[in-house]
Image: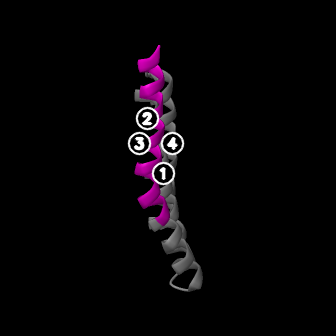
Amino acid sequence: MIVNILLVLAMFFVMMGALGINTMKGPIPKLLTSSLIDAMSMILLIIALILKSGFNSMSIKLSIVLLFVMLTNPVINHVITKAAYEESKDD
């Protein structure tokens, strides 16, 4: 039951993020919206998979992937946003 709720929430964040990307005007707000989609939906999806598989070696591997996503997502989005800002500043 909880797994299904988490999966529905992940799909909700993807749909709302896609709607947000289409309504934003500039490249930087679009990048920030895409980071929300990536972070929230991946976190909820991986937590649902951990709960679905139970506590075994697969859940440990999924926890490592979750930690990797949580650590690298803000850094990657910052680098992409900074590059887009520098590109728009040159114009």
Q: Position of residue 5 (x, y in %)?
A: 45, 58
C-alpha separation, residue under disc 2 versus residue under disc 4: 20 Å
Look at mark 1 in the image and give the residue it sits on: 41
Considering the whole magenta stretch, tell me its main secondary structure.
Answer: helix
What residue is shown at x 54% (from left), y 68% (from top)? Answer: 49
Q: Which is more foreground, mark 1 or mark 2?
A: 2
- Mark 4 or mark 3, earlier in chain: 4
Q: Is residue 49 above or below residue 18?
A: below
C-alpha separation, residue under disc 1 versus residue under disc 4: 6 Å
- Mark 1 or mark 2, earlier in chain: 1
Q: Are marks 1 and 2 in contact (CB under 8 Å)?
A: no
Q: Are marks 3 and 2 in contact (CB under 8 Å)?
A: yes
Q: Position of residue 55 (x, y in %)?
A: 50, 84
The amino acid on which the numbered mark 3 sits, given as a three-letter code, is His
* Apparent side of residue 3 relative to residue 89 in the rendered image (left or right): right
Inspect this view and state whether residue 14 appears.
Answer: yes
